[in-house]
Image (spheres, coloured by chain):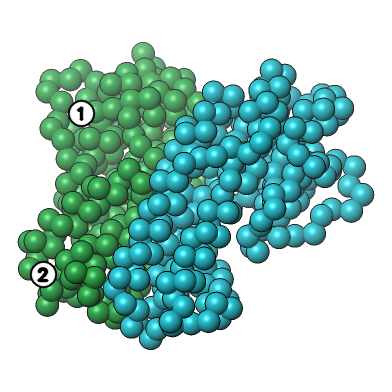
Chain colours: A green, B cyan
Amino acid sequence: MRITTVGLDADDTLWHNEGIFRLTQDRFLALMADHADSEALQARLREVEKRNLRLYGYGVKGFTLSMIETAMELTDNNAPGRLIAEILAAGREMLDHPVETLPGVDQALGELADEYRLVLVTKGDLLHQETKLAASGLGELFVAAEIVSEKDASTYERVFARHGTGAAQAVMCGNSMRSDILPALEAGAYAAHVPYPLIWEHEMADAPQNHPRFAELPAITDLPAWVRSLS
Amino acid sequence: MRITTVGLDADDTLWHNEGIFRLTQDRFLALMADHADSEALQARLREVEKRNLRLYGYGVKGFTLSMIETAMELTDNNAPGRLIAEILAAGREMLDHPVETLPGVDQALGELADEYRLVLVTKGDLLHQETKLAASGLGELFVAAEIVSEKDASTYERVFARHGTGAAQAVMCGNSMRSDILPALEAGAYAAHVPYPLIWEHEMADAPQNHPRFAELPAITDLPAWVRSLS
């Protein structure tokens, strides 16, 4: 079984993301301190995000709209205008935030790109993800970037059929068990989990137990050796 | 020169879209009637949309955020909370709006799909466009749907190379001179303009003059005969 293709998640696998969401959320908590206690606010924000996921999908624009909606709900539509303006500004700053690649990413991807086809597979706002890939300087290493609305088994089947030689000859690597690992394994691919210190609650799931095509790797720099060991 | 592939724009080519934006904008004007006159408000909204395009891209979520930002700016951050809640609701309703295909679309696409590879090429929010395509019942007729952040000549080169046999053997059909016609011609494809009664100012451009690969068609039902005439 020869591996031909390596799929890589983007946010919190190649560059920092959840940390930026947390900083914005902390700013939101501070702005709302007079109106709601921190725990109630976080619970309500999660509830609003979850409710809107069907319409907004993933990404900063939907998150910004959900923060505004949460502020309106928790203040009985009496949120001070300055607060709304601040939330809008926070959303724009997230979209304009510089991209910081994670340690070891350049080296690992450089090694992998010499031997395998690399495909970026990510959720989020279309334009924002394209912009981040361009800003990361990693774009040239990928044969394709697939920005998708949902990551399920059929997503990985389609992506690895289109840009590689099928899921059975592909490895997916990412920080989310729920979105990167479990559906890639279900599609028949290999999958390597590289954890990130923070994770959005929505992305949490249990690790697969004793799965023959799964590896837990401490860092992305361990990925090239693992992929080579499969060939 | 045999045509193998037909690209189709989605919004206002296959189904109504700008009308829904206009209805929402009218609702916004009515909500803001106490704070700004209609003309000033529309001018400011266009300005805010244009300023945010670089960060938000195209689609309903960015439009909703820009309406809120416009409301805050024109009221010195004193927009009534109910107004913000109404704008949020209007945005969600746009995302949840039923898809109404335009007259003749089913028949024209059915005919074309028998002889050519059909590719959907559209801007907008990723999840929203996928949802609309699924709701339209037209999904099965397309070999691929490309939701893109910008439509320029390189977009059409890439899309027709990936899903067809190159731009020289492809026709693009849409309602926007700026996004569907001019860049497709520049890429070397044929292009058919089918106008829609309303158009967003940002999408306006002059028609090409005496271009050998361009046609102005009164309706999408005229498309199959024109495409066949090129083969």
Q: Residue at position x 13%, y 20% from top?
A: A210
Point out the residue furthest to the top here: A1
Label 1 belongs to which residue?
A: A215
Note whether A90 is above or below B115 in the view shown: below
The quarter in which the N terminus of chain B is drawn is: top right
Chain letter belonging to callout 1: A
Tag shown at residue B86: none
Note whether A47 is above or below A69 in the view shown: above
Locate residue B48 relative to residue A50 in the image: left or right: right
Mark 2 residue type: Ala
Locate residue A96 relative to residue A180 in the image: left or right: right
Locate residue A68 relative to residue B125 in the image: left or right: left
Chain letter belonging to callout 2: A
Q: Quadrant of residue B77?
A: bottom left
User: Do tags 1 and 2 sit on the same chain?
Assistant: yes
Q: In the rendering, at what x and y percent does residue A168 appear? A: 36, 17
Mark 1 residue type: Ala
Front of the two marks 1 and 2: 2
Q: Report crowding for label 1: few under 14, some 14 to 19, many 20 or more residues within 10 A (C-alpha).
A: some
Q: Nearer the viewer, residue A72 or B155?
A: A72
Q: Secondary structure at mark 1?
A: strand
Mark 1 and mark 2: Cα distance apart in space: 42 Å
Q: Residue at position x 80%, y 42% from top?
A: B218
Note whether B36 is above or below B159 in the view shown: below
Label 2 belongs to which residue?
A: A36
Q: In the rendering, at what x and y percent does residue B130 appear? A: 47, 38
Q: Nearer the viewer, residue B155 or B192?
A: B192
